[in-house]
């Protein structure tokens, strides 16, 4: 055991790269490890990105072409890059990272299961983090900060991790010094501006002692002094038959302290505290040799900005409101499919310009540069996206337009990243009029990047009072490398016939009543999104869910192994109605089971069975006649028994669903053929 501890010089924890950049993980998120809860640092502290930036600076010193040099040298260290130019350009626009050059794939880093060391001397590539909360308890529930325990430990800091303290024991009548692991606190303070802080127990004790009944007004605990000069805080259980914080007692054991009588923690979760504006994920963690943390990391006062919001929340570190990531997912498309002709011309001219510079043809360089500037000026006159929703629509429309309208030969230019086959001809005469195109996607590359994150509540659009925080601490124009993850899989792309949708009349008033229903403020963003998509969103989304549920019955793998990507827009410039159902590598069904359903007999049977199964629900007639159910009451005739799928499979939290819009005998999209399907 001693040998294991002495060699455990790096506090490493194996975390899946897909968890590291996900809806619930990323810079600023809390991850629970074998050593305690840690907060993931901003991307400037990610080792492999630090290495990319170092190589880039070296290329400038050597006067090498940066992009080629960085990719060559980074590959020697096992660092590779995504070739998704469309995603790179979108990140430049959405995050104002105008000088972004490298979409860097999160590398695979193996951690030894026994010694927790990183194999092949690749520690410098690891993602850094730090403890949060930074308050730890001993066996008697006396609490001190991480810095205080670190100081008490003494000078042999190499043996301090995992956090522990020394205690004297009696063994066979002789005094023996041993070590005991510390227990981490589980309380943090959250702010809608994205801040997160350790709870100030000593200041809270003083405030409750001096003003025991003032619970209605916001209190500035972080500007309040401690209970005494040398606080010895202890949280103990009361003898009363109480649970949770109602049964806990907070006091200071320092002789002469006015707070040594203690206070109850009853009602602590409802206390209003002014936010101190802490940003601990932006602290500099130091190199691998400082695994117990630099002084800046050990302090409980991290990087701070002015905030002063008084609607903060006290939360447990296991709570589900600590982190909500906003991610951007891109289906790889060959540049020729979505690039403007002017962009392609600029790219060709830039290649010529580089060759002219190498051959010192300066007159030609001037001419080529002038042509490039003219084309760029022409491109800059295009109307930019005005908000996040508009940007997302345009980004998805590029994918939809390419898959729905481009030739298969053009789509398959980059066969290693995207390979499709048109199977529309497999539809029989009943279904053919309803669909514009069906594609079997044999190979699909999906690249994901995290845009930003929020706390307390998910960001619901520009009208929200939630502030998103960037995953980087630098100015946007200084960001050169951005972390991404890639997945390969297979899928089915379905594009509906737009002419038929535009000419079809459904029960519009039914949806009007749904959107006019009175809801709380948390539903505002979701309701507005539903109104924008209107019944077309409900139709496409419900069809996607019915197909996923039917695949579960027909193929035997769960909907949790499937994902959907919706293409719905009523805007004239980006009009689209379709969906992509896909499965990623490692998931059940990614070995051909999904695309096998696009064969002629299977495809028609899949659609037929999905629609017929939708006519039956165990909750009917209540479900069928519902005027609002599910989250925010934004579902109509759809419930867990007939239309919902796994939360991880749905893009919209299992809302915007309605069976009637598809199969109702009077107003359903497929009403003309429902009787013929039986």
Image (spheres, rainbow, N blue to C red):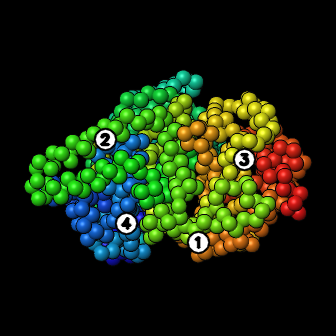
- How far apart marks 2 and 4 lie (CA) works out to 35 Å
Q: Nearer the viewer, mark 4 or mark 1?
A: 1
Residue 592 in picture, x, y percent from top left? 61, 75
Q: Label 3 vs label 4: CA separation?
A: 47 Å
| Observer able to see residue 427 | yes
Q: Quadrant of residue 2?
A: bottom left
Which badge, 2 or 1, is on the more N-terminal residue?
Answer: 2
In the structure shown, which secondary structural element does the residue marked by tag 2 occupy?
helix
Crowd tier of the residue under label 4, counting other residues whose Cα lies within 10 Å: few below 14, some 14–19, many 20 or above = some
Dot 3 lies on which element? helix
Q: Residues within 10 Å of mark 2 (few under 14, many from 20)?
A: some
Q: Marks 3 and 2: in contact by CB < 8 Å?
A: no
- Name the residue: 64% across, 61% down: 438
The residue labelled by disc 1 is 590
> Viewed as shown, does residue 549 lie left or right of 65?
right
Is 52 on the left-hand or right-hand side of 130?
A: left
Q: Quadrant of the C terminus?
A: bottom right
> Which residue position is annotated with label 4?
107
Residue at image location 55% in from the left, 67% down from the top: 420
Is residue 411 or residue 62 the one in the foreground?
411
Asked if residue 417 is positioned above or below residue 531 in the image, the reply reads below
Q: Measured along the vertical axis of the image, is residue 437 above or below residue 506?
A: below
* Whether label 4 touches label 1, CB < 8 Å: no
Q: Sort mark 3 into few (<14), some (14-19) or many (20+) by Cα contacts within 10 Å.
A: some
- Looking at marks 4 and 1 on the same chain, the residue that comes earlier in the sequence is marked by 4
Circle 2 is placed at which residue position?
376
Residue with the mark numbered 3: 500
Q: Secondary structure at mark 1?
A: loop
């Amino acid at each position: 055991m001693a040998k294991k501890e002495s060699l455990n010089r790096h506090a490493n924890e194996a975390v899946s790269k897909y968890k590291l950049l996900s809806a619930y993980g990323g810079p600023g998120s809390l991850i629970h490890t074998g050593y305690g809860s840690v907060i993931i640092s901003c991307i400037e502290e990610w080792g492999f990105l630090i290495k990319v930036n170092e190589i880039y600076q070296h290329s400038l010193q050597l006067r090498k072409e940066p992009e080629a040099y960085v990719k060559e040298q980074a590959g020697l260290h096992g660092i590779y890059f995504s070739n998704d130019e469309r995603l790179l350009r979108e990140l430049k626009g959405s995050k104002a990272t105008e000088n972004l050059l490298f979409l860097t794939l999160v590398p695979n880093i193996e951690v030894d299961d026994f010694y927790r060391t990183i194999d092949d001397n690749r520690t410098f590539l690891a993602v850094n983090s730090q403890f949060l909360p930074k308050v730890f308890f001993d066996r008697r529930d006396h609490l001190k900060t991480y810095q205080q325990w670190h100081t008490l430990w003494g000078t042999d800091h190499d043996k301090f991790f995992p956090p522990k303290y020394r205690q004297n024991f009696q063994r066979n009548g002789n005094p023996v010094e041993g070590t005991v692991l510390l227990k981490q606190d589980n309380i943090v303070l959250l702010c809608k501006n994205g801040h997160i802080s350790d709870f100030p127990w000593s200041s809270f004790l003083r405030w409750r002692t001096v003003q025991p009944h003032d619970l209605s007004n916001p209190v500035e605990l972080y500007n309040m002094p401690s209970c005494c000069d040398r606080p010895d805080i202890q949280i103990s259980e009361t003898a009363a038959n109480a649970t949770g914080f109602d049964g806990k007692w907070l006091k200071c054991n320092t002789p002469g302290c006015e707070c040594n009588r203690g206070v109850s923690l009853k009602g602590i979760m409802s206390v209003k505290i002014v936010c101190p504006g802490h940003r601990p994920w932006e602290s500099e963690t130091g190199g691998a040799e400082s695994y117990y943390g630099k002084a800046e990391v050990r302090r409980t006062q991290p990087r701070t900005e002015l905030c002063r919001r008084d609607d903060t929340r006290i939360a447990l570190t296991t709570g589900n409101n600590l982190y909500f990531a906003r991610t951007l997912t891109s289906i790889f498309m060959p540049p020729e499919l979505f690039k403007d002709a002017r962009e392609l011309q600029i790219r060709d001219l830039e290649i010529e310009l580089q060759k002219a510079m190498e051959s010192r043809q300066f007159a030609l360089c001037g001419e080529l540069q002038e042509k490039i500037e003219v084309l760029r000026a022409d491109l800059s006159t295009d109307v930019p996206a005005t908000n996040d929703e508009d940007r997302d629509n345009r980004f998805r429309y590029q994918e939809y337009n390419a898959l729905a309208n481009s030739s298969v030969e053009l789509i398959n230019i980059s066969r290693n990243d995207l390979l499709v086959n048109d199977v529309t001809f497999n539809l029989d005469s009943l279904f053919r009029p309803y669909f514009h195109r069906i594609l079997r996607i044999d190979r699909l590359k999906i690249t994901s990047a995290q845009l930003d994150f929020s706390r307390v509540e998910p960001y619901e659009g520009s009208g929200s009072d939630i502030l998103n925080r960037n995953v980087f601490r630098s100015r946007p124009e200084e960001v050169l490398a951005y972390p991404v993850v890639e997945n390969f899989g297979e899928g089915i792309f379905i594009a509906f016939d737009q002419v038929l949708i535009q000419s079809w009349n459904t029960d519009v008033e039914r949806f009007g009543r749904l959107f006019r229903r009175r809801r709380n403020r948390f539903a505002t963003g979701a309701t507005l999104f539903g109104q924008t998509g209107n019944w077309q969103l409900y139709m496409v989304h419900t069809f996607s869910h019915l197909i996923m549920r039917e695949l579960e019955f027909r193929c035997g793998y769960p909907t949790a192994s499937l994902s959907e990507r919706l293409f719905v827009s009523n805007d004239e410039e980006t009009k689209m109605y379709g969906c992509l159902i896909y499965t990623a590598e490692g998931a059940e069904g990614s070995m051909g089971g999904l695309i096998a359903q696009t064969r002629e007999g299977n495809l028609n049977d899949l659609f037929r069975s999905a629609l017929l199964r939708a006519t039956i629900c165990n909750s009917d007639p209540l479900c069928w006649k519902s005027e609002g159910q599910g989250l925010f009451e934004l579902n109509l005739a759809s419930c867990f028994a007939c239309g919902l799928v796994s939360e991880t499979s749905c893009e919209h939290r299992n809302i915007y669903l309605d069976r009637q819009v598809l199969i109702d005998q009077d107003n359903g999209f497929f009403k003309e053929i429902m009787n013929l399907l039986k």
